[in-house]
């Protein structure tokens, strides 16, 4: 059995996230306290109590999701003796790539929290509210080719690209609002359903260039070391443990496509992964894994009981 740990992205956050882990395990409480201290903010209280609209803000949701993912991994290692080295690969969806890097020790937890806080703020600053948009194209006819065609129609009136190639049946487009609106109409004509997303900015598109510049400056000053397990990167869908390549790809990721479907296909194929474990809040990536790699097992590690059952199964 070959294992890969997966780390969720934005949208999986919810009030109460991580609370059962904190109540059950000292390792989880220490992670939340360390993140609070790094950010000089009671993020753990916001995660536990809300309000939801504050937790959903990009600058809060990103470090919060990372904190829960790292809490899961630290608890697995300390309480159950399951270290990240048990995995052949790790991969994270968008901000989840930072969670993967923190979990593998490539970036310190405190630095990861500060980088994600800045990433959220920089993304928000890059495009005035209301000028950008994202939409999820879904349905049995939806694949990358359909999404590319819809985005090309949108690009006739403004910036519009494929942002997240999640899996067949779920591809996200991003760009200027008028262009995304045009792409939505084109997608419907091609047989897809299109759902505008309630997001604060158009992520993973060229409009995020100012945020990429800010992240390049921040990452240039950050300490990165080789991860304890190879990271399959969003923008290449290939594994690496080269810190300088990781640094460069994190900058490219701000404006680049999240090639999640390709990443999963590579891990389940060339990578030989037969079991995926989603570490953190929600079950989105485990669900995608079952659709992309139906022959592999996929589990979600959310609650204390999940961690115990997973550790026993290894």
Image (spheres, rainbow, N blue to C red):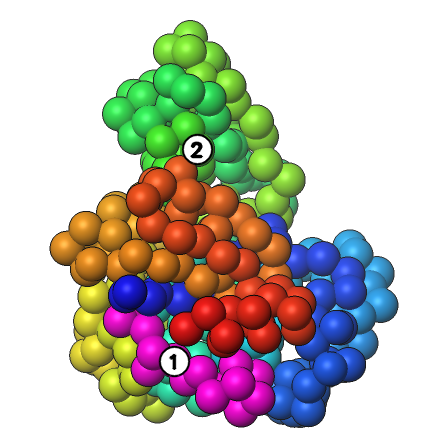
* 311 w.r.t. 147: above or below: below
Whether tag 2 and tag 1 are in contact, CB under 8 A, the answer is no
Q: Main secondary structure of the magenta part?
A: helix
User: Count the marks: how many?
Assistant: 2
Residue 219 seen by the camera: no
Which one is nearer the viewer's eye here, 205 or 224? 224
Residue located 62% across and 89% down the image: 27
Give the farthest residue toward the front.
Answer: 312
| Residue 237 figure quarter | bottom left
Q: Position of residue 125 (x, y in %)?
A: 55, 59
Q: Position of residue 161 (x, y in %)?
A: 35, 36
Residue located 77% across and 61% down the image: 15
Horizontal side of 166 relative to 109 (left or right) equals: left
Residue located 19% across and 51% down the image: 269
Give the farthest residue toward the left.
Answer: 270
Kindly identify which residue carries mark 2: 170
Residue 183 seen by the camera: yes
In the rendered structure, find residue 84 and report the number of the disc placed on it: 1
Find the magenta span and give its range: 74-89
Residue located 60% across and 67% down the image: 306
Magenta stretch contains residue 86:
yes
Horizontal side of 84 relative to 13 (left or right) equals: left
- In which quadrant of the rendered image does the N terminus lie? bottom left
**Mark 2, other Cα within 10 Å: few <14 / some 14–19 / many ≥20:** many
Q: Position of residue 131 (x, y in %)?
A: 56, 38
Which one is nearer the viewer's eye here, 301 or 34? 301
Name the N-terminal-most of marks 2 and 1: 1
Label 1: element kind: helix
* 202 w.r.t. 182: above or below: below
Which one is nearer the viewer's eye here, 159 or 253? 253
């Amino acid at each position: 059995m070959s294992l890969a740990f997966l780390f969720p992205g934005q949208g999986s956050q919810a009030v109460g996230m991580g609370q059962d882990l904190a109540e059950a395990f000292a390792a989880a409480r220490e992670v939340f306290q360390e993140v609070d201290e790094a950010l000089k903010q009671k993020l753990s209280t916001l995660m536990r109590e809300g309000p939801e609209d504050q937790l959903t803000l990009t600058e809060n949701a990103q470090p919060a999701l990372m904190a829960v993912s790292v809490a899961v991994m630290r608890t697995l290692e300390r309480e159950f003796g399951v270290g990240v080295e048990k995995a052949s690969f790790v991969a994270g969806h968008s901000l989840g790539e930072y969670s993967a890097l923190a979990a593998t020790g490539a970036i310190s937890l405190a630095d990861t929290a500060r980088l994600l806080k800045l990433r959220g703020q920089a993304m928000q600053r890059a495009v005035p509210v209301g000028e950008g948009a994202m939409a999820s194209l879904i349905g049995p006819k939806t694949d990358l080719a359909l999404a590319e065609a819809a985005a090309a129609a949108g690009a006739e009136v403004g910036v519009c690209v494929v942002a997240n190639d999640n899996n067949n049946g779920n591809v996200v487009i991003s760009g200027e609002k008028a262009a995304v609106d045009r792409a939505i109409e084109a997608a419907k004509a091609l047989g897809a359903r299109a759902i505008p997303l309630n997001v604060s900015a158009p992520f993973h598109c060229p409009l995020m260039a100012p945020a990429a510049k800010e992240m390049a400056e921040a990452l240039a000053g950050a300490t990165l070391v080789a991860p304890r397990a190879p990271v399959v990167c969003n923008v290449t869908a290939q594994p690496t443990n080269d810190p300088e390549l990781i640094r460069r790809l994190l900058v490219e990721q701000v404006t680049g496509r999240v090639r999640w479907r390709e990443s999963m296909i590579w891990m389940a194929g060339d990578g030989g992964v037969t079991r995926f474990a989603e570490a953190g809040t929600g079950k989105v990536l485990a669900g995608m894994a079952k659709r992309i790699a139906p022959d592999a097992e996929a589990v979600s590690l959310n609650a204390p009981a999940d961690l115990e059952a997973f550790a026993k199964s290894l």
